[in-house]
Image (cartoon, coloured by chain):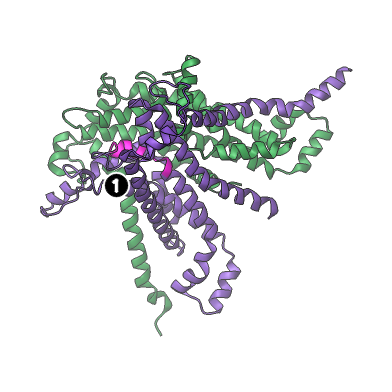
Chain colours: A green, B purple
């Protein structure tokens, strides 16, 4: 009889071969963006997108960062990168903090109507944002926040709130009630209980929430294109302008460098904390 | 009232005090806005919102617009292919990865990273890859196969499929992760019993394993349907809705009618229909999810 280890050899090889092909397919666009961002334009035209760079250059990166034309102005992506950074820091911090407090209230201080509140927030996670675009544009105008980064922060806080609340609520729901009761008997108040007992035990859910919010807000395009003006655009909108409204010569290498710039922060987070990213995705899909 | 009494009262009110600003935001900016948009869809608003009641006029006009019909048809084609391919590919990859693969973690990470990228970045990468002048067609020509043609993105009848390619690349890894989590959740005892009964290989999967993945499949369909209906960024970055109107979707229709064609009433009506479609899918799902948890 053949050793089972060897009878398995052919299917195993085939299995790894198929997986290798898939890995190549999924990596190809990233490879193409990276490789071509280091090539002169002439080399891309002559050798196509798939060949590795021969005549390495960082000029496309410098152009994408500080001199490429975005719309009418030749500012490069730098100012818009900074817009996105400020927007994301403020919006993630505020929405996560509020979400933690809300989740704490909804799970540990169940009041009359808490179930309904939970349902309203749950459904809010899934609305197509087209339904709020028109009134939001009007309100931002009335508040004097139209076309500002602060306006975008407000929008992202509001529409991220449901998600952050649900993440924390579901996490705190499995936090032992006995500990909460013991702390209350010891005289802990609302905020003491939160700050001393729950918050110190919230590490994983904070990481999951921050990553979820960071990825979503950094990658948002719809709110950015609807509510920002030429100066307050986030990076996604600026990148789209760079790629799609360029007239004349299409500078593929600059476009790809810009795309990597736009992808870099979320990719970095994914590489450093992929486990939490996946956890957020899965709990976003299967509530609870 | 004593000071202690007041403090105790404040403590009792605190949860509601802390929660009410967020609840107000949600009530105003989500539910209030939904009601307002529904209202606008019944007015003759054009460049600015006005209060002239127009009844169903916007909806009647909407459904007479060929442009809207194209958007709906495109969504049906794009949505069904996107969902089918993501699920087929996600299931296949999850099963392949469940065969005690070396480097499983690394491969999983590669399959899932597109999900961390924005649709704008995804669209930019695929736009040039699919461009016949510079992308894959050009590369194959350089290898000497000059008869090779792959110009779907420039072809009105085929461009919608390029949207499917880019979107499946973006999301299928996530569906794989959903299924893999489901596979890992199957009771070892059940599998052992099935093996003793003689189920093996493909039959083990079709008879025992895949039916157990129903909850994961259900979640995947819901999330993908939801993503398909909302699709906007990818269209803008990849094709801009073109060539012509070949890749217009309801989301791009809504945006252009509201903000560039100054037909706000029609745009609002389109948004309402999008919301209703999402609600028809999500509400039963959320109900089942939360109910199941309460009773189970």
**Does any portion of residue B35 appear in the rendered image?**
yes
- Circle 1 packing at 10 Å, graded few (<14), some (14-19), many (20+), is many
Q: Is residue B178 above or below residue B244?
A: below
Give the total number of marks visible in the rendering: 1
Q: Is residue A129 above or below residue A277?
A: above
Q: Quadrant of residue A235?
A: top left
Residue at position x 69%, y 36% in the image: A106
- Residue B240 among those drawn in magenta: yes
Compared across the picture, whether A77 is left or right of A126 comes to: left
Compared across the picture, whether B195 is left or right of B65 comes to: right
Outermost residue, top side: A144
Quadrant where the N terminus of chain B sits is top right
- Residue A213 among those drawn in magenta: no
Q: Which residue is nearer to you in this view: B172 or A214?
A: B172
Q: Position of residue B12 (x, y in %)?
A: 79, 28
Q: Which residue is mark 1?
A: B160
Q: Main secondary structure of the magenta part?
A: helix
């Amino acid at each position: 009889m053949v050793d089972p280890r060897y009878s398995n050899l052919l299917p195993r090889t085939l299995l790894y071969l198929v997986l290798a092909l898939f890995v190549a397919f999924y990596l190809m666009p990233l490879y193409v963006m990276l490789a071509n961002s280091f090539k002169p334009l002439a080399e891309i035209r002559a050798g196509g997108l798939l060949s590795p760079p021969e005549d390495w250059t960082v000029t496309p990166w410098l152009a994408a960062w500080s001199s490429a034309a975005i719309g009418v102005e030749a500012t490069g992506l730098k100012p818009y990168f900074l817009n996105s950074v400020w927007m994301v820091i403020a919006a993630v911090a505020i929405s996560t903090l509020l979400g933690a407090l809300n989740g704490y209230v909804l799970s540990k201080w169940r009041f009359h109507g808490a179930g309904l509140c939970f349902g309203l927030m749950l459904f809010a996670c899934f609305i197509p944002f087209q339904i709020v675009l028109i009134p939001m544009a009007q309100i931002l105008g009335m508040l004097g926040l139209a076309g500002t980064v602060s306006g975008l922060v407000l929008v992202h806080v509001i529409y991220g709130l449901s998600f952050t609340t649900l993440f924390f609520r579901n996490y705190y729901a499995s936090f032992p009630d006995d500990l909460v009761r013991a702390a209350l008997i010891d005289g802990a108040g609302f905020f003491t209980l939160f700050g001393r007992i729950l918050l110190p035990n919230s590490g994983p859910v904070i990481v999951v929430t921050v990553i979820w919010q960071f990825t979503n807000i950094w990658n948002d395009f719809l709110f950015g294109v609807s509510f920002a003006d030429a100066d307050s655009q986030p990076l996604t909108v600026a990148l789209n302008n760079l790629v799609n409204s360029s007239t004349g010569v299409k500078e593929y290498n600059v476009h790809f460098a810009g795309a990597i710039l736009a992808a870099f922060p979320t990719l970095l987070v994914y590489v450093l904390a992929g486990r939490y990213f996946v956890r957020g995705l899965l709990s976003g899909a299967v509530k609870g | 009232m004593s000071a202690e009494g007041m403090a105790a009262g404040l403590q009792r009110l605190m949860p509601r005090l802390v929660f009410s600003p967020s609840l107000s935001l949600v009530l105003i900016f989500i539910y209030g806005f939904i009601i307002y948009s529904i209202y606008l869809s019944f007015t003759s608003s054009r460049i600015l919102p006005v209060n002239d009641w127009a009844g169903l006029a916007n909806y009647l006009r909407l459904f007479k617009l060929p442009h809207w019909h194209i958007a709906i048809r495109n969504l049906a084609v794009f949505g069904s292919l996107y969902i089918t391919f993501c699920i087929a590919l996600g299931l296949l990859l999850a099963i392949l990865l469940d065969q005690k693969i070396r480097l499983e973690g690394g491969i999983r990470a590669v399959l899932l990273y597109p999900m961390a990228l924005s649709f704008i970045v995804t669209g930019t990468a695929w736009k040039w890859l699919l461009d016949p002048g510079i992308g894959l067609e050009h590369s194959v020509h350089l290898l000497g196969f000059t008869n090779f043609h792959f110009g779907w993105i420039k072809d009105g009848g085929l461009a919608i499929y390029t949207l499917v390619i880019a979107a499946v690349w973006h999301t299928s890894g996530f569906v794989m992760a959903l299924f893999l989590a489901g596979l890992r959740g199957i009771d070892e005892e059940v599998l052992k019993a099935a093996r003793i009964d003689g189920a093996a290989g493909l039959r083990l999967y079709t008879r025992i394993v895949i039916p157990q993945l129903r909850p994961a499949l259900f979640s995947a369909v819901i999330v993908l349907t939801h993503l398909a209906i909302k699709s906007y960024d990818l269209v803008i970055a990849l094709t801009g809705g073109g060539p012509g109107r070949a890749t217009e979707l309801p989301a791009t229709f809504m945006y252009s009618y509201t903000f560039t064609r100054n037909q706000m009433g029609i745009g609002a009506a389109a948004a309402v229909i999008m919301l209703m479609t999402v609600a028809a899918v999500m509400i039963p799902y959320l109900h089942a999810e939360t109910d199941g948890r309460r009773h189970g």
